[in-house]
Amino acid sequence: MECQRFQKLIRNWYFQVQSEAMAPARMVLFMEKHLAECPVCLADTRVREEVQRITTFVLPEVKIRKASEDEKEDKVTKDRSEEDESEEEEEEEEEEEEEEDEI
Ligand SMILES: [Zn+2]
């Protein structure tokens, strides 16, 4: 995988999946979305294999196809990653709405 950004995102998403802050199906969606949009990943022939591997890892095999069809892209809201310095493409400004659980 050549895309540094994607590596970081995956790590971040995976962490969220582990801590049950994100559904695995959503992580898969995000990965696919990134693959479809990122020039680096589009040019990388191996990255899809890796995503495939990660997908089967986070999701039980049976669900893979269904998950990506069910949840569509209106779920992108929570994709808040730590890489604020470096993002210039792929901004989705509609986040921030779910931050009301302070005391
Ligand atoms: Zn990428």
Image (tube, helix red, strand yellow):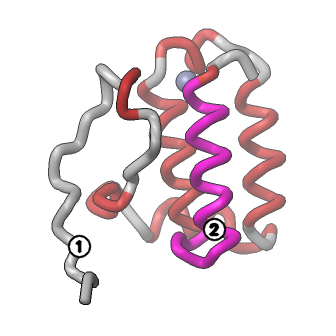
Determine crowd level at label 1: few under 14, some 14-19, many 20+ residues with C-alpha closer than 10 A: few
Task: State the residue lying farthest toward the bottom.
Answer: 103
Magenta segment, principal secondary structure? helix
Residue bearing the label numbered 1: 98
Magenta residue span: 5-24
Task: Kindly identify the residue that appears in the image at 63 percent across and 44 percent down.
Answer: 10
Residue bearing the label numbered 2: 17
> Measured from the top left, where is residue 100 in percent x and y?
20, 79
Q: Amino acid at mark 2?
A: Val
User: Residue 62, relative to residue 57: is it above or below?
Assistant: below
- Residue 45 vs residue 98: left or right? right
- Figure quadrant of the N terminus: top right
Residue 67 covered by magenta stretch: no
74 and 91: which is toward the camera: 91
- Figure quadrant of the C terminus: bottom left
The image quarter containing residue 28 is: bottom right
> Measured from the top left, where is residue 73 in percent x and y?
33, 55
Circle 1 SS class: loop
Determine crowd level at label 2: few under 14, some 14-19, many 20+ residues with C-alpha closer than 10 A: some
Earlier sequence position, callout 2 versus callout 1: 2
Residue 9 covered by magenta stretch: yes
Task: Kindly identify the residue that appears in the image at 66 percent across and 60 percent down.
Answer: 15
